[in-house]
Image (tube, rainbow, N blue to C red):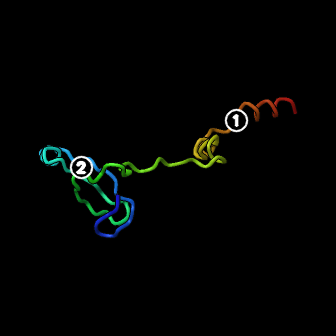
Amino acid sequence: MKCRACWSDKAYVRTVKGWRGIALSALMLVPLKCHHCYHKFSVPWPLTLGKQLTPPPLRVAPETAGSQPAGNRRHAMPNMQAADSARKVA
């Protein structure tokens, strides 16, 4: 949906807990939050029909999809058995 403050098309549903969430659902209002300017607002439920209310999923680039994070190799212990066997042979 479009944000009322900045008019960007990045306003998505936000979760509201407690009595405020119950009051909003009783009044048939949908709480939204803009991901551009962080404006929080509510709109009547019929105005949300046909609009995208959930943010699009984050896509992973194909070249990084199968790679391991660098942290696994960085903190790995060196292979001490290979060094010991090289000393014994020499």
Q: Secondary structure at mark 1?
A: loop
Tell me which residue sits at (66%, 48%) in the image.
Answer: 63
Depicted 26 relative to depicted 12: above or below: above
Q: Position of residue 29 (x, y in %)?
A: 19, 50
Q: Is residue 25 left or right of residue 5?
A: left
Q: Secondary structure at mark 2?
A: helix
Callout 2, which amino acid? Trp
* Foreground residue among 28 and 13: 28
Tell me which residue sits at (58%, 45%) in the image.
Answer: 71
Mark 1 or 2: the one toward you: 2
Q: Position of residue 45 (x, y in %)?
A: 23, 49
Tell me which residue sits at (22%, 47%) in the image.
Answer: 16
Callout 1, which amino acid? Asn
**Pointer 2 residue:** 45
Tell me which residue sits at (31%, 49%) in the image.
Answer: 49
**Pointer 1 residue:** 79
Q: Is residue 85 left or right of residue 19?
A: right
Q: Position of residue 69 (x, y in %)?
A: 59, 45
User: Which quadrant of the figure contains the N terminus?
Assistant: bottom left
Q: Is residue 78 left or right of residue 26?
A: right
Q: Quadrant of residue 35?
A: bottom left
Could you tell me how far apart the alpha carbons at marks 1 and 2 are, in whole angstroms? 62 Å
